[in-house]
Image (spheres, grey):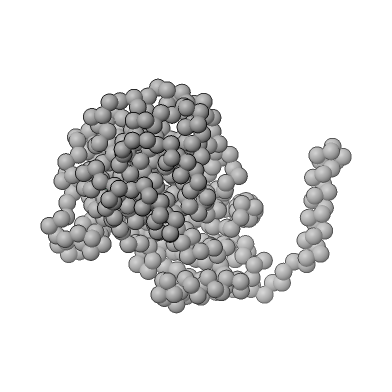
Amino acid sequence: MTFNDRSIRCRDCGTTLTFSADEQGVSQGDLMNFETFNFDSSIMAGVRAIGYATPTPIQLQAIPPILQGRDVIGLAQTGTGKTAAFALPILQRLLHSQRGQVRAVIISPTRELTEQTWEAFSELGQKTGLRSIAIYGGVSIDRQIQKLRNGIEIAVACPGRLFDHMLRGTIDLSHLEVLVIDEADRMLDMGFLPDIQSILRCLIGQRQTLLFSATMPDDIRHLAQDILHDPVTVQIGRIMPATTVSHALYPVKQHLKTALLIELLRRTQTKSVLVFARTKYRTERVAQQLKRAGFRATSLQGDLSQPRRQAALDGFRSGAFKILVATDIAARGIDVLRISHVINYDMPESIDAYTNRIGRTGRVNRNGDALTFVTSVDAAMVDDLERILNVKLERRTLQGFDYNVSAPDRGYVRSTQQLRRHTVRNQRTGNN
Ligand code: AMP
């Protein structure tokens, strides 16, 4: 470690993480600790309680302009500490505002990220008396309405349910001072841009706007141009590739993926493992197969009810489930620092999706493995990946694994599926 380096102790795992001055994007004179931001003592109490000792690079760069009231574009992905980068200055700004009205709204793409951001506000703001709410669909709207009626200053919300509250008149945003659009590129991927534009059209008056995104596709660039006023751009390079995550490919035939996964899991030393499958159906099926093989596995996909999603996440976080099989969208914002392996059971559909998936491991400079199963149809994606990561990815084979087992007879598969459908029909009609 050189004189300019700064290390932080991770509150979740106790690991000491080191950022060089280069990674921090600041010169020696700029290096600072949380005291230098002059946060109110009630906010510093939250920082201490949560266990942050030193600001991360995005915090160093984004907090000062946000405190000055500037609009900010933050190019940073989850895992860099971006939530506290906007939460702390928002808490500071709202500390002396009149209470009881919504003054800050954070729009976030998924329920999971909404919950996590809300938790960060609750923990960091625990001594400030500021009240926050997490707003998303799939749960009772009445409880949210009741909480809003009781007086809230900070709302962390998914766009659909937020707009619903706006249409019903159950949220009053006429006192809004700060709007954060978090993970903007992901909202675009998930088709939320029209909702966000509808929300923006309903907002009146001056406000500070902050936009965070890991990438800057054209639609987001245009959105930023439309809604931000003279923004400061802060950028933190992707921290994941080569240095913190090792990548490997496992060529395999489609029908052998589950057998290979089970064998790999049996033979590899892992902590928490996140497995990505392409569809909700495959996610469920792989999780069931792992359970049957004796693993503590669970699933996370968009068709699950909110309590079941929460139970899966809580169980994965606590270690009750060692393996979480998930779709891309459901896995957004998963913040589990012990993930040692990300396994792409199916190749992701874009480089950004790959980046985002493997950003779940090797978080804040920890080491992780990204293992990707590839079939012959994935050749073009592999080429793109190697070009972007600028490395030839290692192809691995699992010693002793029988790669020559042939695919089950299609006729047999069809007839068992027909049999299953027939049985289900009979069960439904009571014929069984
Ligand atoms: P985020 O990018 O906001 O999802 O944060 C990723 C993880 O880093 C979360 O577990 C945060 O609690 C943690 N974190 C954020 N800021 C700091 C900090 N200054 N020191 C240590 N951990 C941090």
The structure residue drawn at horizontal position 38% and vertical position 40%, both measured from the top left corner, is: 106
Residue 115 occupies which quadrant of the picture?
top left
Q: Position of residue 260 (x, y in %)?
A: 60, 66
Camera-nearest residue between 9 and 426: 426
Q: Position of residue 282 (x, y in %)?
A: 63, 55
Residue extending farthest to the left is: 29
Camera-nearest residue between 227 and 102: 227
Residue 431 occupies which quadrant of the picture?
top right
Residue 43 at least partly seen: yes
In the displayed structure image, the side of residue 108 where residue 431 appears, left or right = right
Q: Looking at the image, is 230 positioned above or below residue 382?
A: above
Residue extending farthest to the bottom is: 392
Camera-nearest residue between 331 and 222: 222
- Quadrant of the rendering where the C terminus is positioned: top right
Q: Position of residue 21 (x, y in %)?
A: 21, 61
In the displayed structure image, the side of residue 5 where residue 332 appears, left or right = right
In the displayed structure image, the side of residue 297 where residue 432 appears, left or right = right
Residue extending farthest to the right is: 431
Q: Looking at the image, is 316 positioned above or below residue 167?
A: below
The structure residue drawn at horizontal position 29% and vertical position 55%, both measured from the top left corner, is: 233
The structure residue drawn at horizontal position 23% and vertical position 64%, both measured from the top left corner, is: 22
The structure residue drawn at horizontal position 44% and vertical position 49%, both measured from the top left corner, is: 333
